[in-house]
């Protein structure tokens, strides 16, 4: 059997899959609205697509060289390892901060606030050193 078509420059507006593999359903009533096969099937089964929107089934991939190359460059840029490392570092940092805040909250709840038993004033600050002239 032939390989299913791959619609490289298109993203399913139902499940955000990109690229769309297999048949692509382009909505004729909405600008820039495409669905993959499974989302189209779920729209039909729910009854939404039968009455409101019209779709055009597209089984072939577009042949547009310059636009395709530009899309591929953008995809490679998004797959840059440095970008992925930075995103992972940010996620780890946020998780660490969240863990720290949660630990502080737990410690505050579990330990009672210290109460002073005496009414003596706090100790005086240490004397300042004099500068030699």
Image (cartoon, rainbow, N blue to C red):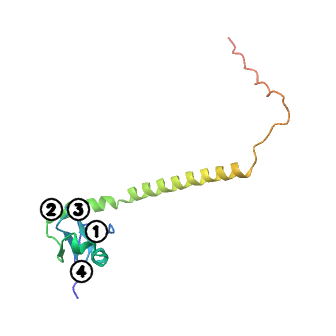
What secondary structure is marked by label 1? Answer: loop
Residue 95: % across, % down: 54, 56
For disc 4, the marked residue is 4
For disc 2, the marked residue is 66
For disc 3, the marked residue is 71
Q: Is residue 40 left or right of residue 114?
A: left
Q: CA distance from mark 3 to mark 1?
A: 16 Å
Circle 2/circle 3 CB separation < 8 Å: no
| Quadrant position of the C terminus in the picture | top right
Return the disc, 2 or 3, that comes first in the chain's sequence: 2
Return the disc, 2 or 4, that comes first in the chain's sequence: 4
Residue drawn 60% across the image and 50% down it? 101
Residue 131: % across, % down: 69, 15
Of labels 4 and 1, the one closer to you: 1
Of labels 2 and 4, the one closer to you: 4
Q: Is residue 90 left or right of residue 26?
A: right
What secondary structure is marked by label 3? Answer: helix
Q: Is residue 33 left or right of residue 120?
A: left
Circle 4/circle 3 CB separation < 8 Å: no
Return the disc, 2 or 1, that comes first in the chain's sequence: 1
Residue 120: % across, % down: 84, 28
Mark 2 nearby-residue class (10 Å; few <14, some 14–19, many ≥20) = few
Return the disc, 4 or 3, that comes first in the chain's sequence: 4
Q: CA distance from mark 2 to mark 3?
A: 9 Å
For disc 1, the marked residue is 12
24 above or below 83?
below
Q: CA distance from mark 4 to mark 1?
A: 16 Å
Q: Could you say which is closer to the camera, residue 75 or residue 61? A: 61
């Amino acid at each position: 059997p032939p390989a299913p078509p791959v619609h490289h420059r298109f993203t399913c507006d139902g499940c955000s899959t990109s690229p769309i593999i297999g048949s692509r359903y382009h909505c004729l009533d909405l600008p820039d609205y495409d669905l993959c096969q499974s989302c189209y099937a779920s729209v039909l089964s729910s009854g939404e697509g039968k009455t409101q929107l019209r779709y055009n089934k597209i089984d072939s991939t577009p042949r547009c060289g310059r636009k395709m190359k530009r899309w591929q460059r953008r995809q490679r840029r998004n797959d840059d390892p440095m970008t992925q490392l930075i995103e992972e570092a940010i996620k780890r940092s946020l998780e660490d901060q969240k863990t720290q805040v949660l630990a502080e909250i737990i410690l505050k709840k579990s330990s009672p606030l210290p109460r002073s038993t005496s009414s003596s004033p706090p100790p005086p600050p240490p004397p300042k050193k004099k500068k030699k002239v």
